[in-house]
Amino acid sequence: MDIREKQHSGLLYLPGDASLQREQLQCLDRLFAFNQLRPSQLEEKAAMLKEMFAEVGEDCYIELPFHADWGGRHVHFGKNIYANFNLTLVDDTHIYVGDYTQFGPNVVLATAGHPIAPELREQGYQYNAPIRVGRNCWLGANVVVVPGVTIGDNVVVGAGSVVTRDLPDNVVAVGNPCKILREADGRDREYYFQNRTIDPSLL
């Protein structure tokens, strides 16, 4: 089996392979150039994202700096996605993010893992499992999502949470490990923060 097939199939492989590293360094050079852009260079940023990512929809915006193991090569973004400072995508395999999702500062989506057996780690073995984040989610500051996790649509993940298991649609989840706190319900269409009410005309 080709090493690129292993990279994207969840099998153990050696990421230090020379051909993989040449490819990865090209991606990282583009990422470096992206991170040197000025905040006002909006058109250049949008154009570079289309070059760097596997897919990217319209009106996506990433605050700099942005970090990615493969410079976004295995990242699939829908439209109208916003990411605050220091988004880190360990995109050794594919990451899928749905439309209108938002990321707080310092969010990490990590597809790469390493075996617990020390003999295998010493040799440099790695495995990858894709991450999927649904439509219209909000991941708060410092959220970490580990390999293989799927997050449903309309999910809010509280700041500082570590998501180790799949989350269904329409829930609020918090903690380490992250657990469902409650379902999103009618109250969330009345109040946006504590007891501050939502103007009905906004809905």
Image (cartoon, rainbow, N blue to C red):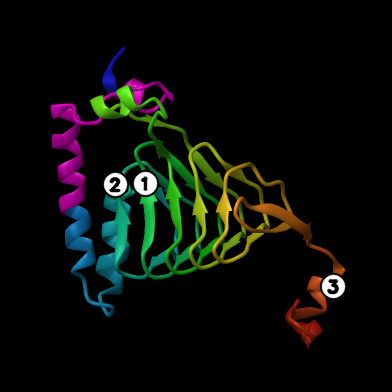
Q: Disc 2 marks which amino acid?
A: Asp
Q: Is residue 181 above or below residue 24?
A: below
Res. 69 mark: 2
The residue at the far right in this view is 186
Camera-side residue: 82 or 1? 1
Q: Look at the numbered discs 2 and 1 and tell me whether their residues touch, using CB distance below 8 Å.
A: yes
Residue at the spot x=21%, y=71% of the render? 37
How far apart, in angstroms, are the residues tagged by discs 2 and 1? 5 Å
Q: Is residue 18 above or below residue 96?
A: above
Q: Is residue 124 visible?
A: no
Q: Disc 1 marks which amino acid?
A: Val
Which secondary structure, mark 2?
loop
Q: Which residue is mark 3?
A: 187
Residue at the spot x=62%, y=64% of the render? 158
Q: Disc 3 marks which amino acid?
A: Arg
Res. 82 mark: none
Q: Look at the numbered discs 3 and 1 and tell me whether their residues touch, using CB distance below 8 Å.
A: no
Asked where in the image residue 121 lies, by quadrant, the reply is top left
Instruction: Tell me the magenta residue range.
Output: 4-29
Q: Quadrant of the C terminus?
A: bottom right
Residue at the spot x=30%, y=73% of the render? 42
